[in-house]
Image: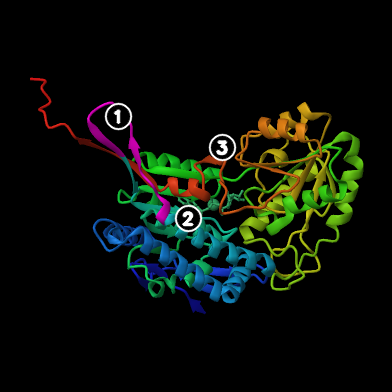
Amino acid sequence: MIRSRMYINGEFVESEGGGWLPVYDPSTEEIIAEVPDGIAADIDRAVRAARAAFDGGLWSQTTAQERGRMLFRLADKIRAEATALAETECRNSGKPIVEAEYDITDAATCFEYYGGLATKIQGFVNPVPDNALSLSLREPVGVAGQIIPWNYPLLMSAWKLAPALAAGCTCVLKVAEQTPLSALMMASWLTEVGFPAGVINIVTGLGETAGAPLVAHPGVDKIAFTGSSAVGKLILKSAADTVKRVTMELGGKSPNIFFADADFEAAIDGALFGVFINQGEVCSAGSRILVERSIYPKFVDAMVAKAKTIKVGPPMDRETKMGALVSKEQYDRVLSYQEIGRKEARLVSGGGRVRSLPHGYYVEPTIFADVDNSSRIAQEEVFGPVAAVIPFDNEADAIRIANDTPYGLAAAVWSRDIFRVMRAVKAIRAGIVWVNHMQPTYVEAPWGGFKQSGFGRELGPWGIEEYLETKQVHINLSEQPIGWY
Ligand code: NAI
Ligand code: MG
């Protein structure tokens, strides 16, 4: 059994509680490693290390250029080790190897992007009406506590760590209990690429016993969270006690809207890609497929025909388009939603586990048609390969249905009519709207939700803003006394 330890203050350590958690390969259901079952004492140790590195430690003395170069070196190392990282990611998460390779490349690109941005954080001179120099300085928010999910393990680590480090923060990253291995592999290179001890701490453990104490810790200045709405709400409440800055990315129930004039072939492809990529374990999954009624029957038939050709199989197979779901818990959850769906709508494709694969959490690409938008499979995030297809009558109807959800992370609109597209873009309440595509994500562009999908933005210059405070400095240039008394 491989025991991967967690990374605190520049060292690989076990939990002070002495416990270990199993890590699975979800495509075989076998245990492939163990990681420390982190507890509050471990979180405390990590936060103290991050605090010391930030408060007058080595990190606070680095220049932005030095921080940027460390991020570049980390990116180079990730690219050099991409094969091993992608295999680890693939085995631990169940996602297809080809997708894992993209994730690793994107993680490296994210570190490079923020390495470059480190030297572009600029202050401001405020035009105050006095004989004074008024400045706005940008300073790192301090120690960042970061909690990530299992669907993009290394990439989510990069989205969290890179902007924080570029801003000059130090970090305690709590990885998902299901998928700790790629981030721990990266941890083994941090000293070599130059990060002083304590700057990056990567802790393992469960949400309640390791995540919750990180949120409550008074030594943490900011929490960045990606995960479920239920946990996001708990974190918000807990963070209130210490008035932490918080950013939240809580997923969604994103509409993928198809008007009758859309390119039909591209539309079918886009509908399937939008919801089945990464086995549907995507926060922005286009899980509500809204189709104009005049093309609806033909559209559903074409989706079903093409869905049957999607190759579900072993994640390491390069032909595989859908691997295994990440865990038994997620598999049970998705199957239970399929049961709910059978009662609420018309099952037209899939609907169960993949019978030809007896081991592993493989679920068929599943499509429900004639879904009512008020039903549970149209309102609740499934986070698996389950599509809800909903017909609409006209543009107003489409917009109404699209917005009829507590979520607001993403949406897509397919049409050749630019005027209709732009009306829809404006009317849809979501943080990301794709037109004639769904899912491409770029480190240069903002990512985050409206409504109950969360708040704050990751990526691009917006991502670094979330790790910066603004300090006003007023320098009196008048040599006269204030003269009030
Ligand atoms: P989760 O929200 O429980 O886990 C995400 C992270 O939060 C993990 O690192 C976990 O350890 C941590 N966590 C859990 N409870 C915590 C607590 N009380 N305090 C602090 N940290 C805590 O998500 P889970 O259970 O893995 O998946 C359940 C559902 O959440 C999914 O079916 C999906 O609908 C949604 N989800 C959304 C994601 C997104 O990208 N927005 C990602 C993963 C899941
Ligand atoms: Mg959970």
Q: Amino acid at mark 1?
A: Val
Name the residue carrying label 1.
128
Q: Quadrant of residue 24?
A: bottom right
Is residue 128 shown in magenta? yes
Residue 32 visible: no
Residue at 73 percent of width and 51 percent of height: 275
What colouring style does the render use?
rainbow
> In the image, residue 247 lies at what x, y percent?
47, 44
**N-term mark: 2 or 1:** 1
> In the image, residue 145 lies at what x, y percent?
40, 53
* Magenta stretch bounds: 119-135
Residue 326 visible: yes
Name the residue carrying label 3.
452
Residue at 89 percent of width and 54 percent of height: 305
In the rendering, which numbered label is found on residue 160? 2
Q: Looking at the figure, which quarter contains the C terminus?
A: top left
Q: In this rendering, which labeled residue sits more in front, label 2 or label 1?
A: 1
Is residue 74 shown in magenta? no
Q: Is residue 303 left or right of residue 16?
A: right
Instruction: Please tell me whether mark 1 sits on a helix, a strand or a loop.
Output: loop
Q: In this rendering, which labeled residue sits more in front, label 3 or label 2?
A: 2
C-alpha gap between disc 3 and disc 1 = 38 Å
Against 349, residue 414 (above or below) is above
Q: Amino acid at mark 3?
A: Gln
